[in-house]
Image (cartoon, helix red, strand yellow):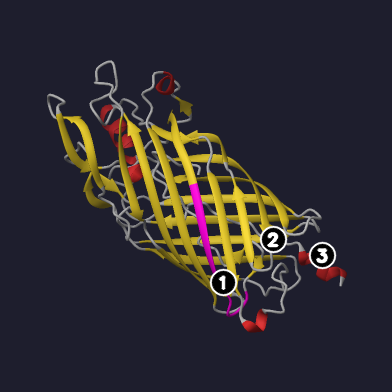
Amino acid sequence: MKTFKLYKNLYIIGILFFLFGKYKVNAQGCVAIRGFSSCNGFMEQGGMIMKGDFSVGTNFRYFQSFRHFRGTHEETHRVENGTQVINDSYFVDIVFNYAISDRLYATVLLPFASHVRSSMYEHGGNPPNGLGERHITRSSGLSDMRLGLGYWLFKHDKRGYNFALGAGIKLPTGDYSYMDTFYNQGPNRDQDIESVVDQSIQLGDGGVGFNLDFQGYYMLSHSFTLTTSLFYLFNPEVTNGVLARGSTTNEFSVPDQFAVQLGTLYSPNIKGVNFYLGGRIEGVPSSDLIGSSEGYRRPGYAISVDPGISYNTNNLSLNLNVPIALERNRTQSFLDKKRTAETGVFTQGDAAFADYLINFNLTYRFRNNKNKAVDFNVVH
């Protein structure tokens, strides 16, 4: 009985934000992370789902990117002069999980996004040489959906640890050539033109991709549990055929994405309440692991501290995390490196990042009749 109680408070918060979309940090902002939430919804916030169980979850994320970085150097003059680009991004993922067996699970994720991008440089230019008029472009709709399978390496017994391997496919269901109005265009800056919006607020990347992921937990004591998640999205396609606005040669790249999370879950003597503190790094690499890395992309990463709190009942799980960026790095892109090699002059573009991300998750489990007598806040 004591051993049973020892595991009663084991809750898992091994979540990637998104990268399921993302994943859609926090390399959020002009670095085109799609705001991912975990493809691994099969490990529910209140414990494991067992054979025949089904769960539905929704994950809401928001961030505002506005701080410009070139490498790890923040270009503070952009905010001081009012020329910064501001992305307000909202993500809502609907996640369906089904336990095929006690160890094999399947996931379907339907991601939706809405972006509002405010800038001067896209609408006549930044002062002093540009008009200095700030306007917005928008995008909203379905993003790239994902299908996934995973397998727990061990039975859900009372060993105090378990690890899962997963794989999934990303489908190009999101619009990757979304268009809106750009003001003060043309040689005399007196035209309004419909054109593709910036890559950072495109709803999809236009490529079929696949991901590998790993998640797990290790119980240190009655109150403390280590959790981890690793995620890598492979995008073998080079470009998606859409020219970046104002370019006649550079098409949007279809880049890889990655995320790593490691943290500690604390279970106090308060029924259903848990606290989490961890670290995470996520971003877009300069070079893909498969295929060419040509095309227009803004690579980079962010390292964040990740505090959170959750509340769980037998079927309902609520979770709030607010990752706070500690380091942001807009790395050299493939094209930056190519230009540097050709000209001998070091070239590196900039990107806007957020200070923090708000992530809220709600999941409800529909239990198989055979499992209704099982306490789902217990790992078996």
Question: Which SS class for mark 2?
Answer: loop
| Number of residues whose C-alpha sits closer than 10 Å to that of mark 2, classed few (under 14), some (14–19) or many (20 or more) | many
Amino acid of disc 3: Leu
Q: Which residue is mark 3?
A: 6
From the viewer's perspective, is 75 left or right of 243?
right
Q: Position of residue 180 (x, y in %)?
A: 24, 43
Considering every residue shown, the one lying at the far right of the view is 2
Tell me what residue is drawn at x 51 percent, y 56 percent: 59
Q: Secondary structure at mark 1?
A: strand
Q: Residues within 10 Å of mark 3 (few under 14, many from 20)?
A: some
Give the residue furthest to the left.
187
Quadrant into which the N terminus falls? bottom right
Identify the residue under disc 1. 151
On the picture, is 118 further left or further right than 53? left
Task: Using the numbered discs, state the Cα–Cα distance from disc 1 to disc 2 in whole angstroms.
Answer: 19 Å
Q: Are marks 3 and 1 in contact (CB under 8 Å)?
A: no
Q: Which residues are magenta?
A: 50-61
Cα gap from disc 2 to disc 3, whole angstroms: 12 Å
Q: How would you rate the neighbour count of disc 1 (Cα within 10 Å): few for under 14, some for 14-19, many for 20 or more?
A: some
Observer-nearest residue: 210 or 85? 85
Amino acid type, callout 2? Tyr
Amino acid residing under circle 1:
Tyr
Circle on res. 172: none
Mark carried by residue 11: 2
The mark nearer the N terminus, 1 or 2, is 2
Q: Is residue 337 above or below residue 120?
A: below
